[in-house]
Amino acid sequence: MAPERSRAFAPGRVNLIGEHTDYNDGLALPFAIAAGITVSATAQPAPSGAAEQVAVHARDLDERDRFALAAPPRASGWRAFARGVVAELGEARFPLVGAELEIGGELPRGAGLSSSAALEVALCLAMIDLGARAQPPASALDRTALARLCARVENDWAGAQTGLLDQLASLYGAPEKALCIDFSTLAIDPVPLRLGGWRLVLLDSGERHELAGSGYNERRSECARACQLLGIASLRDAGEQELERLPEPLRSRAVHVLGENDRVRAAASALRADDLRRLGALLDASHRSLRENYDVSTPAVERAVERLQRAGASGARLVGGGFGGSVLGLFAPGSQPPPGAYEVRPCAGARLLAR
């Protein structure tokens, strides 16, 4: 009898607007893209009396890993994600089986397109589906709960203190839709993203970033400190006048978060009205705040923004956590993005594939 198999795909995401708001109970407007990560899983039962194992091949890196299914030890790099997913699924009582996993995809690491969240989600879906063949689940898969599980992998195993934006965007993405996510409630409101002749493009700054090793965790700590000083649970609860009580740079960090929430609301309204010129102005405003208030831009990112602007972009901003990665540009019909830029459109979210 042929071994059980499963294949899962999880897309990367582009955050249209709403950066560094998710871990502050704010608003964001991401969408899933066509490029992503595919995980192929083949059941590999252990010989009688032996402990079940998980063997992983990261095809693009041509690197391998092997660990115990029951109690994966800690590791670094991409191995942390595979081991963390298996450990967290086991902790959540999902039925699991020994497996051989192969990871491949089109998402560049460190480009700000959420390759880590796509990897976590694809690994989860493949392992859950494979285990369900041996022991079918009692209820339908809760995608929000799965996003939380993937975020624990990111936080506790990979060491990046991210929020839920990337995982939710990958799991709930839909064609021709952006997702307006309220992180205080995790309510998701699909918003039409009708581009017509307009184009959204990405331009790689050429500077890789790793959230766990960048200033990302420091920014999150600064926001937590600002909340502590103001006596509030999250910056979502802060009033503009209260911010004057904060020392720098905490005040600037909070100014960005409150302003970015307003920009998300305005961007969602612009999309519903098909006002893409207004959206372009909001992208520019978001980038200014990320550069001046949140201090997450770099010279390489600024050069990429300038290239898009010189080519006639109606708006441009860094995407992802900053400190490198890609820049998003919006181009009106008839305008030509610079060489090296590539178009992105909203696509379907994570899913199982035919085996």
Image (cartoon, grey):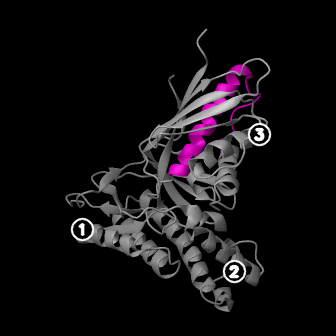
Amino acid type, label 3 = Ala
Q: Specify the quadrant that holds the N terminus.
A: top right
Image label count: 3
Q: Is residue 325 left or right of residue 251?
A: left
**Mark number displayed over residue 226:** 2
Q: Residue at the spot x=63%, y=83% of the render? A: 250
Query: How far, Cα to Cα, is label 1 from label 2?
Result: 38 Å
Which residue occupies the foreground of this view, 82 or 201?
82
Amino acid type, label 1 = Gly
Mark 1 in CB contact with mark 2 (< 8 angstroms): no
In this picture, is 241 found above or below 344? below
Query: How far, Cα to Cα, is label 3 from label 2?
Result: 38 Å
Amino acid type, label 2 = Ala
Q: Residue at the spot x=67%, y=50% of the render? A: 153
In this picture, is 225 found above or below 57? below
Q: Residue 347: where, in percent of width, then height?
A: 44, 43
Which residue occupies the foreground of this view, 307 or 33?
307
Secondary structure under the numbered disc 2 in the rendered image: helix
Q: Residue at the spot x=68%, y=87% of the render? A: 242
Q: Residue 45: where, in percent of width, then height?
A: 69, 21
Decide: few, some or many residues near mark 3? Use Cα within 10 Å; few <14, some 14-19, many ≥20: some
Decide: few, some or many residues near mark 1? Use Cα within 10 Å; few <14, some 14-19, many ≥20: some
Secondary structure under the numbered disc 3 in the rendered image: loop
In this picture, is 194 found above or below 60? below
**Mark number displayed over residue 312:** 1
Write down the region rendered in magenta. Answer: 115-143
**Which quadrant of the view contains residue 253?**
bottom right
